[in-house]
Amino acid sequence: MTNITDSVRSASPEKAPRRAPTARTVTSNDRHAPMTTNEPHTIGEVSHAPQATDERVTCLRIFADSNGETHMQDSDITLLPREFFKDIPPLRLSDTLAASGCNICRVPSGMREVDWHNSPRRELVIWLTGEVEFETSDGDIRRLTAGSVVFAEDTTGKGHISRHPPEGQLVVHVDLA
């Protein structure tokens, strides 16, 4: 089994670019506003699922630096050809990741925004339905659609905000060992 940190690498060789804080911060009063707006802070829809190729899948990594600021960066998980089913051509698979648990989660309808919080543990989060928007303390805001994978490791620091569709959504959490 492989530790996720060994399998995940930055999508670019340089440090992830830091975005300047936005002119408008979404507050709890904006909770019922649609996620899609023409406000300057919204970067639009981004889905990491279509960024999968035969060689890699791109996931969003949320992490805290040594000062407690939280950031997001695109990270790649390498996929290699491996036999998975007998007598079937190889599939493209990542290394097996060490996990200590897994759950299926229904974000209830009407939840909308989860204010500043930390991930309870290091985990891979796979969004099965709907779209989600994340905001980190450095002002970065990213929107992901169903099929996206998030490597959440901001177990300390200022945390992140997540915004969910009014109809709720289905998510899988994989607790990393």
Image (tube, rainbow, N blue to C red):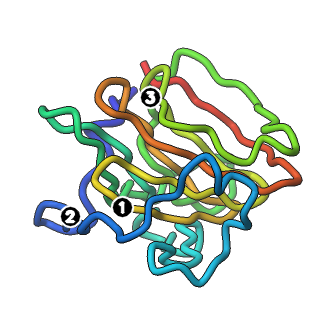
- Badges 1 and 2: C-beta atoms under 8 Å apart? yes
Left or right: where does residue 77 sit relative to residue 67? right
* Residue 18, numbered label: 2
Extreme residue in the front direction:
29
- In this view, the residue in front, 136 or 123, is 136
| Vertical comparison of 52 with 32: above or below | below
Circles 1 and 3: CB atoms closer than 8 Å? no
Q: Which residue is mark 3?
A: 118
Q: Is residue 114 left or right of residue 24?
A: right
Q: Position of residue 175 (x, y in %)?
A: 53, 24
User: Disc 3 to disc 2, how far (Cα)?
Assistant: 20 Å
- Residue at the disc numbered 1: 140
Picture quarter with the C terminus: top left
Q: Secondary structure at mark 2?
A: loop
| Residue 139, position as x, y percentages in the image | 34, 58
Q: Earlier in the sequence, mark 3 or mark 2?
A: 2
For the residues labelled 1 and 2, the Cα–Cα distance comes to 8 Å
Dot 3 amino acid type: Asn
Task: Point out residue 67 in the picture as x, y percentages from the top left corner.
Answer: 13, 34
Quadrant including the N terminus: top left
User: Residue placed at 71% from the left, 25% from the top?
Assistant: 103
